[in-house]
Image (cartoon, rainbow, N blue to C red):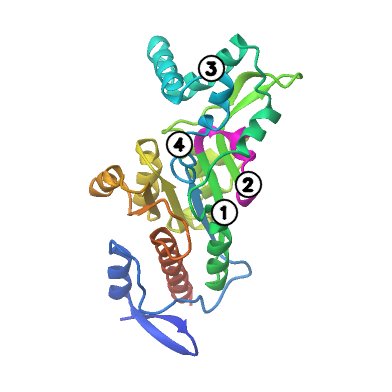
């Protein structure tokens, strides 16, 4: 059997292919018997994509509930009741329904929801514990393993609000629903509508490094798997519910990893996703150091590093 070499301090440990296969297919990727470090690197570090939903994944609740509904003087329950009613009445996509309702409700009250104001609302968005420091911890850990992690948002929420959050700078690209604004800053039409099925488009864009949404050629162009910038085996998707199922399933089916997160004492939905084979792992929405989701992320990074080592050995 061919050993897979990894560096452990000043010693070398060998993993056989059956051992790696067993490790790869296990439901828990930690604790590791030894920390893995890529022994050799190419001219650039292999890129790993960490992709996140936003509402319910990195932030509790819906982002519209942070400031916008206060301006309307409406409860969250009432706003979403109206949105769902419009979607049923006009057979609208639920995402386009809430975006249309935002415009209609603000116009009826002579309120201003300019791009600048939406970005300001983002400054009030609450994040789950540990999210603020999560990205540096992940980046540093991956760097030590010879990998580079890039972070992406794939969300049905509003891009303008996400851009105003304190973590916006951490993402290479934010794929989210967005408005077109007129010369007076007034939203007049959706520029992008991201729903649970169209979310998968952005995974292929990341896979092929086709991040310009106006470019529909490259994302549909045939590119051999081994020539794609971020192969599926180096992808991790984080989501919290039904709208994330297509992305979770796609990434998992193609050899990547999907993690369903859940708030404290609300594990049922995530457990069902795991039982239905929709995701790879589940974890609470606590991103603090030493918590389960961090352990999962570190274990996946270790595994990807081991896979990259194996691929290099196979080339020799």
Name the disc covering residue 166, or none.
2
**Is the C-beta separation of discs 4 and 3 under 8 Å?**
no
**Residue 63 shown in magenta:** no
Q: Earlier in the sequence, mark 1 or mark 3?
A: 3
The one nearer the camera, 255 or 239, is 239
Tell me the residue at 63%/70% (across/down): 43
Give coordinates of residue 298: x percent, y percent: 45, 66
**Is the C-beta separation of discs 1 and 2 under 8 Å?**
yes
Give coordinates of residue 48: x percent, y percent: 52, 59
How far, Cα to Cα, is label 4 from label 1? Answer: 17 Å
The one nearer the camera, 30 or 284, is 284
Left or right of 91? Residue 129 is right
Q: Earlier in the sequence, mark 2 or mark 3?
A: 3
Q: Earlier in the sequence, mark 2 or mark 4?
A: 4
Q: Earlier in the sequence, mark 4 or mark 1?
A: 4
Tell me the residue at 53%/67% (across/down): 142
How far, Cα to Cα, is label 2 from label 4? Answer: 17 Å
How far, Cα to Cα, is label 1 from label 2? Answer: 8 Å
Q: Which circle, 1 or 3, is nearer the viewer?
A: 1
Give coordinates of residue 15: x percent, y percent: 35, 79
Name the disc covering residue 61, or none.
4
Name the disc covering residue 132, or none.
1
Label 1: state its secondary structure: helix
Tell me the residue at 29%/75% (across/down): 19
Left or right of 141? Residue 107 is right
Left or right of 111? Residue 5 is left
């Amino acid at each position: 059997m061919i050993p897979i070499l990894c560096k452990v301090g000043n010693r070398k440990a060998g993993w056989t292919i059956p051992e790696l296969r067993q490790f790869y297919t296990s439901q828990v990727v930690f604790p590791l018997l030894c920390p893995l470090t890529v022994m050799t690197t190419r001219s650039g570090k292999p890129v790993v994509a960490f992709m996140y939903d936003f509402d319910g994944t990195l932030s509790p609740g819906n982002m519209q509930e942070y400031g916008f509904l206060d301006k309307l003087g409406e409860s969250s329950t009432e706003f979403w009741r109206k949105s769902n009613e419009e979607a049923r009445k006009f057979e609208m996509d639920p995402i386009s329904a809430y975006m249309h309702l935002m415009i209609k409700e603000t116009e009826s009250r002579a309120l201003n929801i300019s791009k600048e104001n939406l970005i300001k609302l983002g400054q009030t968005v609450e994040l789950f514990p540990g999210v603020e420091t999560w990205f540096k911890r992940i980046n540093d850990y991956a760097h030590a393993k010879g990998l580079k992690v890039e972070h992406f948002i794939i969300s049905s929420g509003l891009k303008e609000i996400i851009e105003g959050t304190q973590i916006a700078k951490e993402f290479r690209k934010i794929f989210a629903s967005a408005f077109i604004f007129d010369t007076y800053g007034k939203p007049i039409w959706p520029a992008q509508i991201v729903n649970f099925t169209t979310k998968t488009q952005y995974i292929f864009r990341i896979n092929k490094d086709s991040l310009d949404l106006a470019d529909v050629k490259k994302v549909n162009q045939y590119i051999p798997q081994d020539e794609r910038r971020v192969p599926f085996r180096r992808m991790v998707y984080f989501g919290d519910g039904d709208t994330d199922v297509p992305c979770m399933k796609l990434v998992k089916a193609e050899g990547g990893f999907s993690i369903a997160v859940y708030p404290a004492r609300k594990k049922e939905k995530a457990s069902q996703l795991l039982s239905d084979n929709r995701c790879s792992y589940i974890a609470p929405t606590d991103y603090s150091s030493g918590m389960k989701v961090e352990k999962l992320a570190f274990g996946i990074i270790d595994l990807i590093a081991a896979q990259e080592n194996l691929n290099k050995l196979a080339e020799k």
